[in-house]
Amino acid sequence: MRVHVDPAGSWAVAVAAALNEWLGERAQPRLCLAAGTTPEPVYQRLAPVLVADATIFLLDEFGGLPADDPGRCAAMLRRGLLQRAAVPAGRFRAPDVDAPDLDAACRRYEGAIADGGLDLAVVGLGPNGHIGMNEPGSAADSVTRRVDLADTTRAASRRYGITRPPAWGVTMGMGTVLAAREIWLLVTGPHKRRILDRVLNGPVDPSVPATLLRTHPDVVCRVDDRAYRPREPDAADDPAPGG
Ligand code: F6R
């Protein structure tokens, strides 16, 4: 895993410029995009003309919420990117969390992704090391499925303006993400410093699903200098999460 550090003040500009360049070099790319607060300032800076050409697969979605809940991942992505970029409805795909047969819907989603694959997966890092909603314990070969959310994930969902914290969701699996040709892991803020250090330097283990990304040949971790600190011999003085 390569690590690319930018100053916090220019991180979003730098990552958006890199992503615009990436998009500009490809015709009709297939992207997996995470929702959440980390990528938001990047998405705001993407060039609509470049995004409109892409097919976008949403990484994950909360279940059990009203269809118009503003905290749904699809709603966040629509507000932050899709409306502005005028991505045609047919080129935005999301897990159908409202399907009566959820297992069949998950299989359909996995099949749609596999049919062409993903050129790039843009993912964020959860406070417990999750990727998408792949909570601790998620296997490296897991696929799109319904998952129960960890308490920390439920609590964190409050900041998305959600009406009530969801208990479950549907996420691409770690295997689905690892099958992407490239992966960008976006991490910002001092509250992510401890988990980022674990992801970069701890053992590769499903108990911290993001460490599984280190098994992929083409991953770049794009971090700001508030989340990343080069390892020192005594790294035991990391601030507590949220510090
Ligand atoms: C959201 C998602 C989550 C977030 C993670 C970090 O679609 O996949 O895994 O990426 O929880 O969230 P933020 O960016 O809000 O800190």
Image: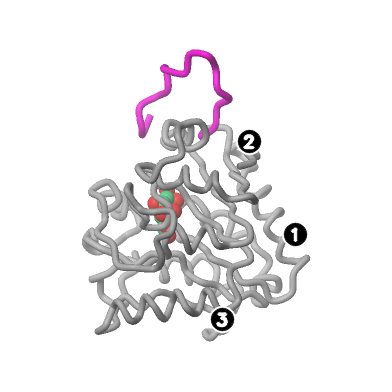
Q: Nearer the viewer, mark 3 or mark 2?
A: 3
Q: Nearer the viewer, mark 1 or mark 2?
A: 1
Q: Is mark 1 within 8 Å of ligand 1?
A: no
Residue 160 locus on image (x, y percent): 35, 57
Q: Main secondary structure of the magenta part?
A: loop
Q: Mark 1 — residue? A: 21
Name the secondary structure under disc 3: helix
Which comes before the other along the chain, label 1 or label 2?
A: 2
Looking at the image, which residue sits at the far right? Answer: 25
Magenta-drawn stretch contains 182: no
The reply to whether dot 1 and dot 2 touch (C-beta < 8 Å) is no
| CA–CA distance in space, label 1 to label 2 | 20 Å
Badge 3 amino acid: Arg
Q: Is residue 36 visible?
A: no
Looking at the image, which residue sits at the far front? Answer: 141
Q: Mark 3 — residue? A: 91
**In the shown orientation, is residue 131 left or right of residue 20?**
left
* Quadrant in the picture for residue 96: bottom left
Badge 1 amino acid: Glu
Name the secondary structure under disc 2: loop
Depth order, front residue of 183/5: 183
Badge 2 amino acid: Pro
Looking at the image, which residue sits at the far top? Answer: 234
**Quarter of the rendering occupied by the C terminus:** top left
Q: Residue at x 47, y 78 (%)?
A: 111
Residue 126 locus on image (x, y percent): 39, 47
Q: Which residues are magenta?
A: 227-243
Q: Mark 2 — residue? A: 7
